[in-house]
Amino acid sequence: MNARPRTELAKVPTGIHGFDQIANGGIPRGRSTLLVGTAGSGKTVFALQFLLEGVRHYGENGVFVTFEEAPSDLMHNVSSFGWDLEGLVAERGIAVVDVTPEPGEETIATGPYDLSALLARLESAIRSVDAKRVILDSIGALFPQLTDANIIRRELHRIAAGLRALEVTTLVTMERTEEDGGVGRWGVEEFVADNVILLRNRLEQEKRRRTVEILKVRGATHQKGEYPFTIDAEDAVTVIPLSAIELKQKSSEIRVSSGIAELDKMCGGGMYRDSIILVSGATGTGKTMMVTQYIKAAIEAGEKALLFGAEESREQLTRNATLWGVDFDQAERDGLLKIVCRYPEVMGLEDHLIHMKREILEFQPKRVAVDSMSAFERVSSNKSFREFVIALTCTIKHLEITGLFTNTTSMLSGGESITETHISTITDTIILLRYVELRGEMRRGLTVLKMRGTFHDKDIREYVIDGSGLHIMAPFRGVHGILSGSPTYTFEDERARLADMFRGRSMEAQDGHIGD
């Protein structure tokens, strides 16, 4: 039996950031796609962006049919994105069909439902601007008085068939009452449309989180599952296609300095240029100090560095760096440093990610530091935080930038945080900073837990912080359990210590006897 060659439906790129990637190129050309979501999920913005991108970048004019929102209100609302709908209408790039009811108008079923007049208006608008893309926004408003699902199914079929005959690609928006469960209100919508896209706007840990899922596409492939997206004034809808990210980052043999000479030796000559470094430790162990040294190394090499602060203000970071002999102010004036500080609570993780990627692409640094990642973890779910880390890490690696993340552990000595668990498998190098309690004194220890692709020192080294920075000293000897937070001494070491202690007491007694 001869196999037929595989064919893929021709697709229309939506132009929406990230969406075409999870849709494997866009939505099928010449067919109807149902865009369903609860209130506030972004249906109208998504649909309008699809329409505007067609006019501006793909030479495809469009028709927008509104069933609920007056065209004047619609144009005013989307002006915050910099969209000039009025101008496009005047230039005959877009035609608007207003099917909104008059104020006080009451819709009453008086006989067989007939959409002939609507289809006639729609066809006229399409031909007037030679449209290739059509939006039917909130089409559910057509059927407020209908309860018979069979009638609704028949009429939706009529609309879809009429639009297909006109050879236009259509997005039909419709509301649903719940984030999960049935696709539409009448239970037939998903069976009528060729393609179904679900937009959700869930409340997670007192934060709204939007996701998009392509439920079905007849005759074409697409990525499965939910993908986070965000809406902002600059780029409107941006989908973050995490599972569609490919592991194709370049790998360099070039080393860069951490800013601490002894740490570079412990790492076999420095950090790899396109690697991600995690510095983990309790509060006060010197994580921000290491960030400062790392930034200083970039400045001294004449390279740009970008610092994202999530716990301290720019003024605090600058003051502390000055105390350690690093002039952040001068580096900013020289164009070698940019500091961006925001509390994680001010926006969702998806918005933070978009803003951070935007800052990276605009400033084009050679090094990026985030102090600290655990601050972002505290305002998110485990899943959204891991997605945030993966997306940021991939961005940094694809651009061949060195990244340094700090993480705060909950225990003063030893232990592991949730943040550390999520990041550890993604990062290339992990440096642990720990408090070490020895003989009634708190000291600090450092070790390179892992470093991919190279030999590294396995010792746990003592380090001190003074006015000139962080200094790594000799390894701890005769002590076990430092990383677990319960150090113990070897028998030989303890026996020698006790011998010295009692020898000292014996000499004191002898001196006292002679004095008598």
Image (cartoon, rainbow, N blue to C red):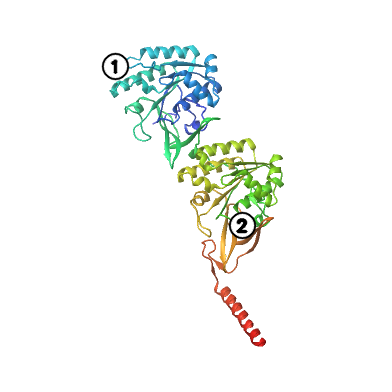
Q: Amino acid at mark 1?
A: Ala
Point 50% across, 40% down: residue: 349
The residue most toward the front is 516
Q: Is 73 left or right of 107, judged from the image as shown? A: right
> For residue 456, which numbered disc appears in the image?
2
Spot occupied by residue 354 in the image (x, y as percentages of width and height): 54, 36
- How many residues crowd mark 1 within 10 Å: few (<14), some (14–19), many (20+)? few
Q: Quadrant of the N terminus?
A: top left
Q: Is residue 76 above or below residue 354?
A: above
Q: Amino acid at mark 2?
A: His
Spot occupied by residue 441 in the image (x, y as percentages of width and height): 58, 66
Spot occupied by residue 353 in the image (x, y as percentages of width and height): 54, 39
Q: Which residue is mark 1?
A: 109
Point 65% across, 46% down: residue: 318
Q: Is residue 250 above or below residue 212?
A: below
Q: Is 290 left or right of 381, judged from the image as shown? A: right
